[in-house]
Image: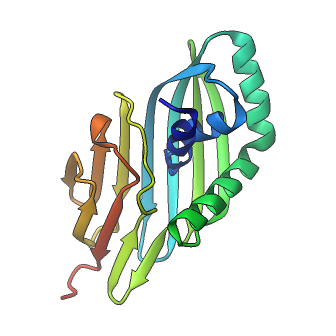
Amino acid sequence: MSNKTMIYLLIFVVVVFLVIDMVTLMMNRSNFTVQYYDTDIYTDYSETATITTVSGLVFKDQKKEDDYLKTYKETSVQTFEKYFSEISKEIGKTIKVLDVDMKTQKRDSVLEITETVTLGGLVTKDGDKFNLGMGDIQLNSVAQSNVRVHLPADAVIESTDPTPTKVVSNMVTWSGKDIARFPNIAFKRGGQQ
C-alpha cells in the first residue's frame, strides 16, 4: 500500500480518506500499519457535508508513534487544507475545509485517531438532483474498513458509484474490498419526480 494512497484514506477516510494519507505526507516511509478505519459522511440538501473517520494505527515502536503524534498535532489542519486544495484542482470542483476537529486516543497498542471535517462543495446541486462526490479519487481498502454515507431521511437515491456493499434506508455502505474509490452518489428529495 503506497504512502500517497494512505493519505487519501485518512482524509476521506475524514474523506477519508483521512488519517492514512496525512501520515504519508508527514512521513518518508511507513512506520505503522492501519488496522482499521470507519468513515461516516453526513449530508443534507446543502453543499456541506461532514466526514468523521476513526482510524486505528499500530506503530513499529514507541518513538515512531511519538514522532508521528508530534508532527500530526503541528501540521494536521494545514494538511487537510492542502489536501482538499489539491483535490479541488484534480477534480475540477472547489471543496473547502470549513471546520476540522481531531482527537487521538491510545487503546492498548493501537493509536486511534478521530477526525471530523466539515466540507463545503462536496455536494453540488444540479436542478433537483444533488451529487455527493470527489471524482475518481482512489482509496485502498483495509479488511476492517467501512465507508458509510448518511443521506437525508427522505432522500431517493438515483445512482451510486462504486456499487455499495449494502444500502439500508438512507445509509449507503462500502466495506473492505468494496472500497475502491471515494463514493459518488446522486440523490433527490423524496416526493420529487
The residue at 56%/36% (across/down) is 20
Quadrant of residue 63 within the rendered picture: top right
- Place of residue 14 in the rendered image (x, y in percent of width and height, measured from the top left): 53, 48
Seen in the picture, residue 174 relative to 109 is either above or below; the reply is: below
Question: As drawn, is 22 to the left or to the right of 110?
Answer: right
Query: Furthest-top residue in view?
Result: 61
User: Where residue 32 sits: x, y (%)?
Assistant: 58, 20
Residue that appears at 29% across and 73% down = 187
Q: Is residue 143 left or right of residue 101?
A: left
Name above or below for residue 46 compared with residue 78: below
Identified at 38% across, 85% down, the residue is 126
Residue 75 vertical placement versus 42 (above, below): above
Relative to 192, 38 lies left or right: right
Give the total number of marks visible in the rendering.
0
* Type of colouring: rainbow
Q: Quadrant of residue 103?
A: top right
Image location (x, y in percent) of residue 160: 26, 62
- Along the viewing direction, whichever of 104 and 145 lies nearer the viewer: 145
Q: Position of residue 143 (x, y in %)?
A: 34, 27
Q: Quadrant of the C terminus?
A: bottom left
Nearer to the camera, 17 or 155: 17
Of 4 and 122, nearer the camera is 4
